[in-house]
Image (cartoon, rainbow, N blue to C red):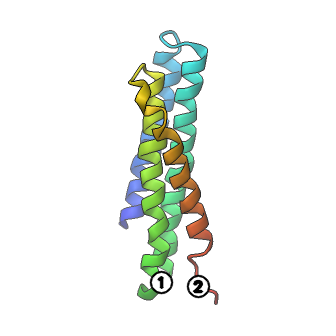
Amino acid sequence: MHLWIRLGGIFGGLSVLLGAFGAHSLEAQLTEKSLATFQTGVLYQFMHSLALILVGLLSLHFADEHKKKIERPGWFFLTGIVLFSGSLYSLALGGPRWLGPVTPIGGLCFMIGWFMLAFSLPKK
């Protein structure tokens, strides 16, 4: 199986697990705002897990000369999941406040990944 498809499946499965954990175990423990922050992390992790799978499927479809260009956005999606969603999980659970500025860096990684993906496909 392709690396990006595998990573997308792993992070997608973890997002479902974390979403269920948040809905069933954290609901009574967290404030409404903290729970919403946690669920935002889950949503973005899930969406970008699908983006990782898309990168994997596209890279399987194109020849080797285009693979690196098509796979490059995957690294930005992966980094975005770790920084954006990871920092939101930590902040929601009472982690250190210095993680707050990490969140937009992860969001920037998501944006870069999408723009790179848009321009990574061959013209023909």
Residue 73 lies, with reference to residue 124, above or below; the image says above
Q: Which residue is mark 2?
A: 122
Residue 92 is labelled as: none
In front here: 113 or 39?
113
Residue 106: image location, x then y, percent: 49, 47
Residue 25 lies, with reference to residue 9, above or below; the image says above
In front here: 12 or 99?
99
Graded by Cα atoms within 10 Å as few (under 14), some (14 to 19) or many (20 or more), the crowding at tag 1 reads some
Number of numbered discs: 2
Left-right relation of 31 to 86:
right
Residue 21: image location, x then y, percent: 45, 25
Q: Is residue 17 visible?
A: no
Amino acid on which disc 2 is placed: Pro
Residue 66 is labelled as: 1
Q: Secondary structure at mark 2?
A: loop
Asked if labels 1 and 2 touch by Cβ distance under 8 angstroms, the answer is: yes
Q: Residue at x 52, y 28 (%)?
A: 38
Quarter of the image where the N terminus is located: bottom left
In front here: 12 or 30?
30
Amino acid on which disc 1 is placed: His
